[in-house]
Image (cartoon, rainbow, N blue to C red):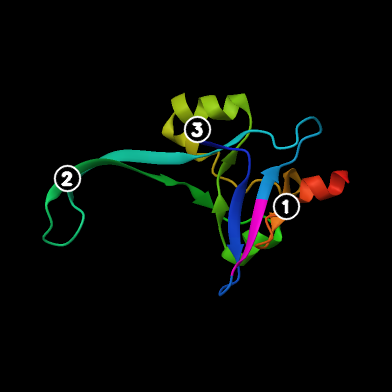
Amino acid sequence: MVPFSSYCEPLGKRPADWVWHSLRSETEERPLGAFAGIWRSYSGPVKKDGDDITENVFAFMTCGPNTLETAVAHERMPVLLDKEEQFETWLRGTEDEAHALANPYPAEGIRIVQRGSSRQDLLEVAED
């Protein structure tokens, strides 16, 4: 798992509209969540005919999109975990139990907290 309090998705191209998201919470500004990730040790060349190396490599797991604008634009979204029992299942459950968590996060559970290149935190604007 890779923890996050917000994450960014580009929308469009050249220049991309960078859209930052966080989970919604009644009690926290940016609650902690986690990306579901996978990893393994890789041994082999990085480039064709290159030297062999041994490295731990990882990736975030993705699933289909929810109805949030940025997720729909990409036809995928990261698998987001936000509950202690999900963390436990991802780390210690069976393969089938963990795979059952790979679903789109509900759109109503996510909010946009920054958009564009202005770097203006939309949560700060809302407080003014």
Q: Residue shown at 46%/35% (left/top)?
A: 96
**Position of residue 77 in the picture relative to residue 42 (left or right):** right
What is the CA distance from the residue labelled 3 to the residue labelled 1? 30 Å
Residue 73: where, in percent of width, then height? 62, 66
Q: Going from the N terminus, do you reach mark 3 or mark 1 first?
A: 3
Residue for point 13% across, 57% down: 50
Q: Position of residue 31 (x, y in %)?
A: 69, 34
Three-letter code, disc 1? Ile
Q: Nearer the viewer, residue 52 or 41?
A: 52
Q: Residue at x 45, y 40 (%)?
A: 37
Q: Which residue is mark 2?
A: 53
Judge left or right: residue 9 versus residue 41: right
Residue 3 image position (x, y, % from top left): 54, 35
Question: Which residues make up the magenta segment?
Answer: 16-20
Please name whichever residue, 95 or 78, is drawn nearer the observer in this view of the structure: 78
The amino acid marked with disc number 2 is Ile
Disc number lying in front (3 or 1): 1
Image position, residue 113 (x, y; %): 72, 50
Our reading of the magenta stretch's main secondary structure is strand
- Residue 97: numbered disc: 3
Distance CA(mark 2)–CA(mark 3):
33 Å
Q: Secondary structure at mark 2?
A: strand
Write down the quadrant of residue 66 in the picture. Answer: bottom right
Looking at the image, residue 29 lies above or below residue 53:
above
Q: CA distance from mark 1 to mark 2?
A: 40 Å
Q: Which residue is mark 1?
A: 112
Q: Is residue 33 visible?
A: yes
> For the point 60% across and 53% down, which residue is it?
8
Q: Nearer the viewer, residue 68 or 64?
A: 68
Q: Label 3 crowding class (10 Å Cα cut-off): few <14, some 14-19, many 20+?
A: few
